[in-house]
Amino acid sequence: MAKVLAVLSSGYTDEEHNYVTGWWAEELFAPALELEKEGHTVELASIDGGKPIVDPISVSADYDPNGIYKKQYESGIADKTMPIVNVKASDYDAIMIVGGHGAMFDLAHNEDLHAVINVVYETGGIVSAVCHGPAPLIYTKTKEGRNLLEGLKVTGYPNDKEPKEVVDLLPFSLEDELNKIANYHEEKDHDAYVVWGSKQILTGRDPQSSELFGRELAQKLTERTLKLEEKFTS
């Protein structure tokens, strides 16, 4: 089946404001489970490689009351990641950028990640991101020089859900930056929301959308894999 690269923030610390963030646990583990159910393989990468910093709030009782994601994190599943500079992008059928505020700090402007995204896209793969994960997509440009998300329908974490205590610590507003190049939708009436901006671009709104996001990606990859198999056997 398909091979998916999940990209995580290596983490960000602001000692002055006692602020630590990184990747969001549910946004890795919930989609990965859906992908694995369909028989797809998920490999992990981060900017620095090694063990990336999980946002501690994402494995707290408030956001993970049953301890599902904390247990997965503590199992060591995400302790080993490839440095993004070492990734051979052409090996992957899809890239999945995991959210968490950390994505806005180290993933957003990383040129090595932009290059990996472009290779996956230009070879016909799926580029997907959930919650704050679209941050690097905002700044990724195609070989023609246009923004990857230009004019597309997208979603991501909305301004009205950002915690007031961290807004001033963030480098930019995800919603505002998405709106500059794409057609941002929040769909407040939906408990979970994902959108295909094109047949190759999938975005999910928030942690609550993680499972749906993973299911959409998994099913699309399965459909594509079966079509390829039919093509080669016919």
Image (cartoon, rainbow, N blue to C red):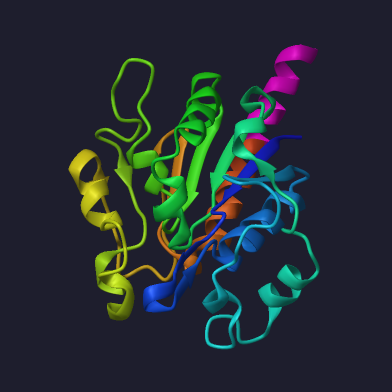
Q: Residue at x 75, y 22 (%)?
A: 229
Name the residue nearer the viewer: 44 or 157.
44
- Start-end of magenta stretch: 222-234
Rendered location of residue 196, percent (x, y): 42, 42
Q: Looking at the magenta stretch, what is its main secondary structure?
A: helix
Give the side of residue 234 with respect to residue 65, left or right. right
Residue farthest front in this picture = 16
Occupied quadrant, residue 51 = bottom right
Q: Residue at x 46, y 46 (%)?
A: 107
In this view of the protein, can residue 32 be seen by the observer? yes
Which quarter of the rendering shows the C terminus?
A: top right
Occupied quadrant, residue 58 = bottom right
9 relative to 209, above or below:
above
1 relative to 230, above or below:
below
Residue 62 among magenta residues: no
74 relative to 224, above or below:
below
Rendered location of residue 221, percent (x, y): 63, 37
Which quarter of the rendering shows the N terminus?
A: top right
Residue 228 among magenta residues: yes
